[in-house]
Image (tube, grey):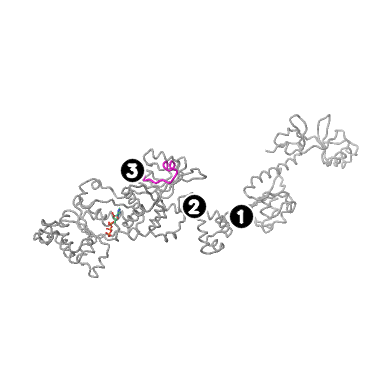
Amino acid sequence: MILWKDILKPITAVVGHDYSIKSAIQKITSERTDIAFVEKQGALIGYITNSHLLEQIGAGQSLDEPIQYKEDILKVPDSLPVEFFHNVTTVIGVDSSGGVTGYSTVKNARHQINELQLIHLNEIIHGAGVGIIRTNSQFKIEFMNETAERFLGLPGSFLLSRNYKALLTMEKDLQRVLDGETLVSVNSTINFKQMSGNFYPLKIDGNITGLVHMFYLREEFEEAVQELDFVRHLYSDLQAVYDSSNEQILVIDEKGTILRVAGQFLSSFWKTKEADQIIGKQIEDFTRRNIFQPNIFELCVKQGKKVTSIQQSSGKTRIWSVATPVYHEGKLEKVVILSRDITSTAPINAETELNPELFETETEKKQLVYRSGKIASLLNNLRRAAKMNSTILLEGESGVGKEIFAHEIHFASQRKDCPFIRVNCGAIPEQLIESELFGYEKGAFTGADRRGKAGLFERAHTGTIFLDEIGDLPLNMQVKLLRVIQEREMARIGGTETIPIDVRIIAATNKDLKAMVAKGDFREDLFYRLNVIPFCIPPLRERKEDIFPLAVYFLEEFKRTYNIEKSFTPDAISVLEMYGWPGNIRELENIVERLIVLSQEEWIDREVVLKVLYGEEEAKKKQPLVLEMMPLKEAVAELETQLIELGMRKYGTAAKVSEILGVSPATISRRMKKIKK
Ligand SMILES: Nc1ncnc2c1ncn2[C@@H]1O[C@H](COP(=O)(O)OP(=O)(O)OP(=O)(O)O)[C@@H](O)[C@H]1O
């Protein structure tokens, strides 16, 4: 707000109301002013200017005639804000005790206000880095701010009073602005500097008294736009990464309000379909409703460090969560929680889970852990086939879990309450295999048990026999097996009696049986007898979604065995998922055990996983882009730095790197300066 006292000028010439034109001219001239105030009985009642006096003389009056002064003056308290009054051209300011403190013509007041407003505006705009130039109605530069001086590389002292129109090169005619038009986003050049900005007509009392040019230096502006563009692209790339991740990313502020959910929304855990429905809510409310249990957010805030936990909602959904605190200038700002669903999609068969008798069979039923659609549909088919009595052949690489699938078949069949017998055909010595499979009568051979012994086929009677590594079965045994399958009866070694055998046969192999048949290493007739319903178990690398729940499952098992607390970091999981797993699930199980033993810390991190999977040297080469969950801005900066460093290593010049990254060379060199710091 501008007050009258800010703009009042001192009164220097005072004349009496009965002064002659001559004495008034003498007074005004001696005081070097162009206005004198007229006094009568100690009060100022009007004013007279040089031009008024000249008008009187011009009208034929003699110099001795009295002055004809103007009376359109108004006394105002000088502490009031400037305002304009009808029919008043001059204002006299008075202080609180009524003393005159100065005067101002209305014209001068308006001019001063514009000037002061421009200075204020300049202060505001100064920080925003906008250049401002004002001209009068003859295009003479009357004002320019510091930013304009800096942008143009020319001092105000040089530019002030010069004709702006003559100095500027631009496509549009500047006269249009003085005719009242606003020119927006106009490119212009001065002193080889390219500018981009707007020209506004400057109106006072409805009259155009000049123009104002507000502008950016195009070089800086374009760089900023490019930079914004670059960041925008990075942002959308990162967003895409988040959205395609199979993790749920939850951002909670320090007060426990859910700010954001990205990645895969675990709707069955939250018991709500849309992520939007949990945003803005208090996390504690979900804990109270038995959904977010345990409250990992609270644990993380209390401990002030990364925390992991398996959470379970009131339903069956179990999720694995890692909560990481994010600090800003030493203060907790938010907590980021990464979660994955680890609920095994396998339906839990109450009977098989609970019936203790089942555990008296040769092998306990193990939990089959998976999340992939591939395994889901395979299981579907397996369970359907299980209902029939047909022989099933399971093919698949070593360690894919063929035995566990054989269990599934058994437990999904009518025979689930009868024995399940596993025979590892490759592990039994050749000379023992016949007696193991078919048993023997007492005294059948030297060293034989005196009482005789039932073979595995007999023991599997009414149940399932699982012939693992069937490709390792010697040829002579293949004939005998073929006979059992065909005749559904057998005799013990040394026995004469035939024993009827009612078993479901499941055979498994990691060898190419067809190729073995072609080479004569496997009997063709047996192959066709076994290959009634074949199933191929896909390797782990073809069902990466299973890696995570399996890794957590094994980790939990080993934690129980070793009685220790350890957790994977999300980066560690990512490395596990990227690996090729030639040894499949058996290898994964072994690696998890090794990681537990080798990692000294509570956290099994990316580095230790890389070391265990690839060895020390290779691990060093696998440099990460982003190691930790971190604020997006930092992640973008990190990604930028790494891209530029990579580019510089590869191409050597900022010009080439800028071309590849699609940004200006100036951006690259500025970033590099920052990196060097
Ligand atoms: N889906 C699964 N869930 C839990 N554990 C599994 C799963 N698949 C495999 N395993 C475990 O991985 C290990 C290897 O499985 P398994 O011995 O059944 O493999 P395989 O295919 O029979 O291998 P091979 O051909 O070498 O005999 C076992 O300890 C098994 O319990």
* Outermost residue to the left: 496
Q: Which residue is mark 2?
A: 635
Observer-side mark, 2 or 1, equals 2
Looking at the image, tell me whether mark 2 or mark 3 is earlier in sequence order. 3
- Residue 187: assigned label: none
Determine the secondary structure under disc 1.
helix
- Amino acid type, label 1: Glu
The CA span between labels 2 and 3 is 36 Å
Q: Is residue 374 left or right of residue 301?
A: left
The CA span between labels 1 and 3 is 57 Å
- Amino acid type, label 3: Gly
- Residue 220: assigned label: 1
Horizontal and vertical percent position of residue 74: 76, 34
Magenta residues, start to end: 297-317
- Amino acid type, label 2: Ala
User: Residue 419 or 99: which is nearer the viewer?
Assistant: 419
Horizontal and vertical percent position of residue 344: 32, 49
Residue 28 figure quarter: top right
Q: Which residue is mark 3?
A: 315
User: Residue 318 or 606: which is nearer the viewer?
Assistant: 606
